[in-house]
Amino acid sequence: MSGIQPHGCNFPCYLCKAHRKDFETTCYPTRTVRSLFEDHAAFKLWCVGKSKTAIKEGAKQFYSVAYPPVIAKPTTEEELNQPTRHVLAIDELHLLTGIFKVIYYACKEHFPTMDRWPKKCGCQSQGYHGGVFTGGDSTLMLEQVGLLENMAREEYNFTVLRFVAAFRALDKVRQACFSTKLRADWSEALDEFKSAMTDLITDKEMGVNCTTKIHVVFWHVRQECEEQVQLNAENPRGLGRVSSQTGESMHKAFL
C-alpha cells in the first residue's frame, strides 16, 4: 500500500527512510504521507527514457518508492505531513509471526531436532511464506517455550538458550504491547527484546539479520507506544486495537 518495493530493496521500511543496513541503529528520517507521494512522483519523472534495468535499480535513489501509494492523497498540510504510521497502522500480527519465524529457523540451524517442540505444543508450520506459524500457534509455542529450553538442556545445547531468551522477550512484547491496552511494563519489554535480538544479530554465527519487522519493533513500536501514552496516560491503547487477525482468519476460505 505504501508503494515501496519488496523487502529485499534498500529502503523497505514503510515507516522511515533508514537504509536496511542501518536498521539496528536508526529509524530516521521519518516517512510521511507527503514523502510517499513526492518520492514516487520524482521517481516516475526520473524513469522517462530509462531502460527497464535502470528503472529497477534507480528506485533506491527515491527511497524505494517505485509504485503509486494505494492510499487516498490528503489535501491539507497537516494530513500530508503526518507520519505514515498514522495512515498505515503497525500490524502486530505480522510482526509476531514474522519475527517468530526468523528466530525459529535460525535456532533450527543450531538445533536440528527442534521440530519436536511444535509437535509437543500441538502446532505446525503452514505451507506458505516459507513455513510460517500462524499467530495462534506462535502464541501457543511462546507460552510453552520452557519445553524448548528443557529439550536443549537435555542435549547440552546451550547455544539454544540464547534463542530461548529471544523467544521469551518476544512473548513479553506480545503481552505488553500487542494487546488492546498497553501494559505498564511496555518500555521494559521493548528494551529486553532489543537486547536479546541484538545479542543474536551481532554474532554472525547465529544467522540472524535485522529484518524490517525486527527494526519496526526496535524503533517504531516504541514511537507508537509513546504517542499512545501521551494521548491517554491512564489508559493507553496497545497495537492490538488495530489488527489484521480477522482478515487473516479467512485465508483458509480461499484455499
Image (cartoon, rainbow, N blue to C red):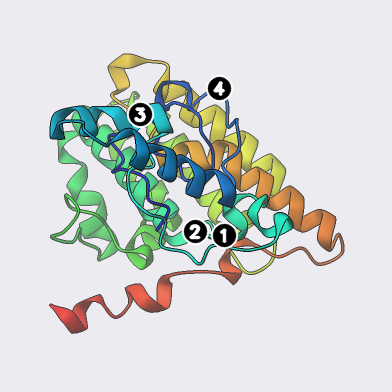
- The reply to whether residue 183 is visible in this rendering is no
Q: What element carries label 2?
A: helix
Point out residue 32 in the picture as x, y percentages from the top left corner: 59, 46
SS label for mark 3 = helix
The extreme bottom residue here reads 253
Cα–Cα gap, marks 3 and 1: 32 Å
Lower position in the chain sequence, tag 4 or tag 1: 4
Q: What residue is pinned by disc 4?
A: 25
Marks 3/1 in contact by CB < 8 Å: the verdict is no
Q: Which of marks 2 and 3 is nearer the N terminus?
A: 3
Q: In which quarter of the image is the C terminus?
A: bottom left
Which mark sits nearer the N-terminus, 2 or 1? 2
N-terminal-most mark, 2 or 4: 4
Give the secondary structure at mark 4: loop
Residue 92: give its label. 2
Please tell me whether mark 2 or mark 4 is closer to you in this view.
4
Labels 3 and 4 touching (C-beta < 8 A): no
As shown in the figure, which amino acid type bears the numbered disc 1?
Phe
Q: Mark 1 points at which residue?
A: 178
The answer to whether marks 2 and 1 mark residues whose Cβ atoms lie closer than 8 Å is yes
Which quadrant of the structure image shows residue 148? top left
Which sits in the foreground, 81 or 193?
A: 81
Local packing at callout 2 (Cα closer than 10 Å; few below 14, some 14-19, many 20+) is: many
Between marks 3 and 4 in the image, the one whose residue lies nearer the viewer: 3
